[in-house]
Image (cartoon, rainbow, N blue to C red):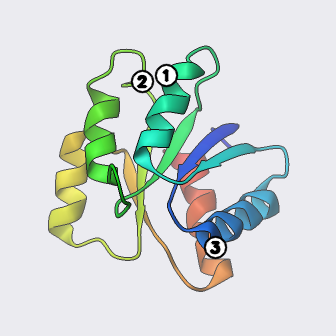
Amino acid sequence: MINYRNLLLVDDDLDDHEFFLEAIHDIDHTINCQCVLDGEEALNILKEQSNTLPDLIILDTNMPKRNGRQLLVDLKSDSKLQDIPVVMYSTFFSDKDSDELKKLGAVSYLVKPSNFADFRNALSEILTTC
């Protein structure tokens, strides 16, 4: 069963937005996903839309302006946003990265695979287990 209905994807790559949205639609077309290009835009939207916060944030680690780690710290230090689960999203995570991100408050991490089926399955697991 899908645990999340409203997602926020924060990623500076438009191709990754399309890939992500296609996978979400394939998993469950009723899931709503808003996409933004950087951490500053995400933070502004979250503060403006405080009545309709996402159920889950998927956050790219490497972005201009405010990177994923910086935004994660900002989210977890804001009493209105700190309870939103955050899944970090990148092409690679070392064990050190994973440990650090979990200490900062991320619930999990998702590696950006090039294979659609693998990505869809990993995303589906995130949506049902986190």
Q: Secondary structure at mark 2?
A: loop
Residue placed at 21% from the left, 42% from the top?
Answer: 104
Q: Position of residue 83 (x, y in %)?
A: 41, 25
Please report whichever mark, 3 or 1, sits nearer to the chain's N-terminal start. 3
Residue 4 occupies quadrant: top right
- Residue 93 as seen in the image, left or right of residue 28: left
- Name the disc covering residue 47, or none: 1
Relative depth, front residue between 111 and 18: 18
Label 1: how many Cα within 10 Å (few below 14, some 14–19, many 20+): some
Q: Quarter-wise, where is residue 13 in the image?
A: bottom right
Residue 51's x, y, as percent? 61, 14
- Tell which circle, 2 or 3, labels the residue nearer the N-terminal end: 3
Gap between marks 2 and 1 measured at Cα: 9 Å
Q: Secondary structure at mark 3?
A: helix
Which residue, given by chain and number where applicable, does mark 3 sit on? 15
Left or right placement of residue 66 versus residue 34 in this view: left
Disc 3 crowd, CA 10 A, few/some/many (<14, 14-19, 20+) = few
Q: Nearer the viewer, residue 100 or 130?
A: 100
Residue at point 39% right, 58% down? 109
Q: Which residue is mark 2?
A: 81
Using the image, determine if residue 30 lies above or below residue 65: above
